[in-house]
Amino acid sequence: HIPLHISSNQRVVENEDASNSNSQQQSLDRIEKEIDAETYRTNLKIAALASDCAHKSNTTAAVQAVRLLRRLSHPDSVAYNSVLKTLAKISPSKLKSAQLTPRSSTFSSRGQHEGSWVDAAHVGEELLEEMMALHRQQVTANQEWYERLGKGELSDVELERGAPRVRVKANVRSFSTVMDAWSRLGDREAAQRCEAILQKMTHEYEETGDIALQPNLISYNTLLSAYAKIGDSEKCMDLLRVMRNENIDPDVISHNAVLQAIARSLEPDAGESAESYLRESMRYCRLNGRSYTTCMDAWSQ
């Protein structure tokens, strides 16, 4: 047996290397915590603005929410969803494009210029697309990091920093909120935009199998509301059939939307159709006062 001797100089070098490594890791951890803290504080501010918009159509609060989002160095899904909520609550109001300080040139590339006004719903849809693009970028960066890890290509600094985080991911709430913003405009084009967003979400769900992207009752009720506002009762009935095919049971909100569509259809037999639908719906769902008053409204047309 031959003893191995390590000189004091070697020990000093090893200790210094370990100390430097620990110091770098602590520095990275501190930066990550600061980023998380900044995002958390900003999310609280945006949530407060969203709450304010929920009680009154406060376009100033919505603009402030968008600006707070833009100031975040590392925004997350919570921040985006909260801003989407503020935009939905103030819809159909418009915002001045110059106030929004977009992250990219998306607005100008779609015909918007500095002095123009843009629907809150349009801003919401732009942010939704931005969420999806950021998610793809972050997922790609994360996957590439692990691929390089497997090949042993990562530097010490990259190893200490760890895999890039996926901070932004649109979900059914994100899509449904933007649909809500469009549905509040109350015209056919807006209803069609609302339907296009549902179709996009359905496509994403079918492509990825991600349960967080599966359209739900709220999604369909939002679309029903959009078509109810323009009196398209035939489309609403079609949507009910789609819901049942997707094993989504319509609720009182769904049925009230259909009744509203019938009432606004201005058809000569709207009252008779609404009452017939009301009686049929009672077999499947417990209706409420709005159901009956909407039926009465159909008769009064």
Image (tube, helix red, strand yellow):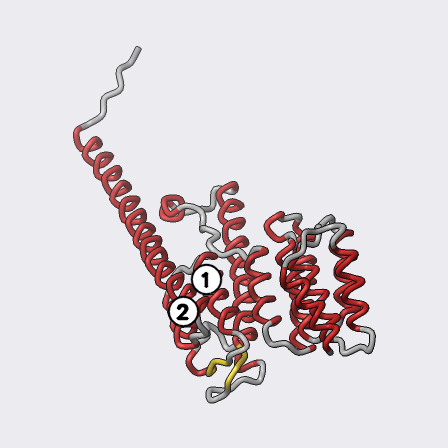
Quarter of the image for the C terminus: give it.
bottom right
Q: Dots 2 and 1: beta carbons under 8 Å?
A: yes
Amino acid residing under circle 1? Ser
Which of the 4 image quarters holds residue 70?
Answer: bottom left
Quarter of the image for the N terminus: give it.
top left
- The residue sitting at 82% across, 74% down in the picture is 269
Q: Nearer the viewer, residue 58 or 79?
A: 58
Residue 244 percent location from the top left of the image:
76, 52
Residue 182 percent location from the top left of the image:
60, 72
Amino acid residing under circle 2? Ala
Farthest-out residue, top: 1
Farthest-out residue, bottom: 115
Q: CA distance from mark 2 to mark 1?
A: 8 Å
- Which SS class for mark 2? helix
Q: Quick check: 263 above or below 239?
A: below
Residue 7 percent location from the top left of the image:
19, 27
Task: Please name the residue that numbered disc 2 is placed on.
Answer: 65
- Which SS class for mark 1? helix
49 on left or right of 276: left
Q: Is residue 227 at all visible to an observer of this figure?
A: no
Q: Nearer the viewer, residue 211 or 218?
A: 218
The label on residue 107 is none
Farthest-out residue, left: 8
Task: Classify mark 1: residues with Cα within 10 Å, few (<14), some (14-19) or many (20+).
Answer: many
Residue 194 percent location from the top left of the image:
65, 69
60 on left or right of 296: left
Q: Nearer the viewer, residue 70 or 196?
A: 196
Task: Please name the residue that numbered disc 1 is placed on.
Answer: 82
- The residue sitting at 43% across, 60% down in the picture is 79
